[in-house]
Image (cartoon, rainbow, N blue to C red):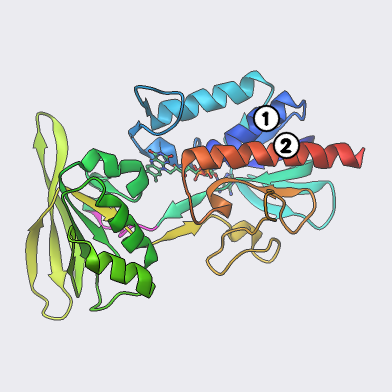
Amino acid sequence: MKKTKVIIIGSGPAGLTAALYAGRANLSPLVFEGQQPGGQLTITTDVENYPGFAEGVKGPELMEIMRKQAQRFGAETAFKTVESVDMSKRPFKVVAEGEEYFAEALIIATGACAKWLNIPSEEEYKGFGVSACATCDGFFFRNQHVAVVGGGDTALEEASYLTNHASKVTIIHRRDQMRACKALQERAIRNSKINFIWDSIVEEVVGVQENGHKKMTGLKLKNVKTGLTNEFKCDGLFLGIGHQPNTMLFKGLLDMDSVGYLKTKSHSTETNIQGVFAAGDVADSKYRQAITAAGTGCMAAIDAEKYLTQLE
Ligand SMILES: Cc1cc2nc3c(=O)[nH]c(=O)nc-3n(C[C@H](O)[C@H](O)[C@H](O)COP(=O)(O)OP(=O)(O)OC[C@H]3O[C@@H](n4cnc5c(N)ncnc54)[C@H](O)[C@@H]3O)c2cc1C
């Protein structure tokens, strides 16, 4: 059995920034890294929008730096996944890989996962043309032709953002009408850079090897009404079919919205349970950036520190 002041669940930018601040506040944080140590940025290549890196930085390298910085101030990191949490009384009990741990405060930073199409070629071209984040990767597609899959608000927002960079944006939707709100639909229709392919699904991402590098060159599309397939040329594919926050563990314990994002009080990281704080993408359906996750991770550690002080 192990007891500490703060347990942090998740080791993305939110969890590791919370660990840095909690470590510097002498709270001896214990971080459970989960199945994706370092979080979502470990599956990307260049991160060009994290402040402090004028030349950009590789995602995995950035996360290694964040981990080392937190460890320097006493944060302990464990490559374990949390299986259950008991928040009914303090100290809170966390079970990770069969072992019990206790803490006076918890910071939940379990992130969210983009929804993917789950076809093998998508996996092959992730980071080489296929992306689920226009704000992160749109810049790499200047004056190119990109496709966006989806028909809801996310897809239209991603498409609209991409027109700042791409020469042309094609929205591919499996139905013949959008689910997105009217205002977004009208804006997309008015935008001369955006066009639509209806009733179609992506069957395959196609590409070539150029000078030892993979490069996406197009998509194999299938019309769901006619059953016909065709090859569609484009330079990038963005998934705009939504995200799923990693909150299964907290169902019935913490307040969440209809999608599963944790609810926090305004201007705070406090959840509905005193002593439990949420940071990063797990509580943010809107911004979903490394810097905003790190920002709320900092807030969560400060909130936890204040909470623990007032308990003394
Ligand atoms: C391909 C890709 C490229 C991106 N590029 C950029 C970019 O260039 N710039 C940018 O700002 N943002 C980018 N993003 C978005 C950015 O990665 C996220 O906004 C950010 O990582 C969110 O941080 P987080 O700490 O909230 O969660 P995450 O990074 O999602 O981390 C969640 C953590 O929780 C852990 N976890 C989950 N469940 C458990 C459990 N049960 N027990 C223990 N641990 C658990 C996971 O293992 C992981 O460590 C990109 C995202 C993707 C997918």
Residue 306 placement: quadrant:
top right
Determine if residue 32 is in view. no
Residue 49 percent location from the top left of the image: 40, 34
The CA distance from mark 2 to mark 1 is: 7 Å
Looking at the image, residue 147 sits to the left or right of residue 161; the answer is left
Residue type at mark 2 is Ile
Residue 102 percent location from the top left of the image: 78, 42
Q: Residue furthest top?
A: 72
Query: Where 212 falls versus 124 (above or below)?
Result: above
Mark 2 Cα-neighbour bin, 10 Å: few <14, some 14–19, many ≥20: some
- Callout 2: CB less than 8 Å from ligand 1: no
Point out the stretch of residues depicted in magenta: 115-120
Element under label 2?
A: helix
Residue at 69 percent of width and 22 percent of height:
74
Query: Where 177 falls versus 269 (above or below)?
Result: below
Precedes in sequence: disc 2 or disc 1: 1
Element under label 1?
A: helix
Residue type at mark 1 is Tyr
Query: Disc number at residue 21?
Result: 1
In the image, residue 50 lies in the stretch drawn in magenta = no
> Can you identify the residue that label 2 sits on?
302
Locate the C terminus and report the quarter of the image it occupies.
top right
Query: Disc number at residue 46?
Result: none
Residue at 8 percent of width and 73 percent of height:
228
In the image, residue 117 lies in the stretch drawn in magenta = yes
Mark 1 Cα-neighbour bin, 10 Å: few <14, some 14–19, many ≥20: many
Residue at 28 percent of width and 53 percent of height:
238
Label 2 with label 1: CB-CB less than 8 Å: yes
Looking at the image, residue 183 sits to the left or right of residue 234; the answer is right
Residue 122 percent location from the top left of the image: 25, 52
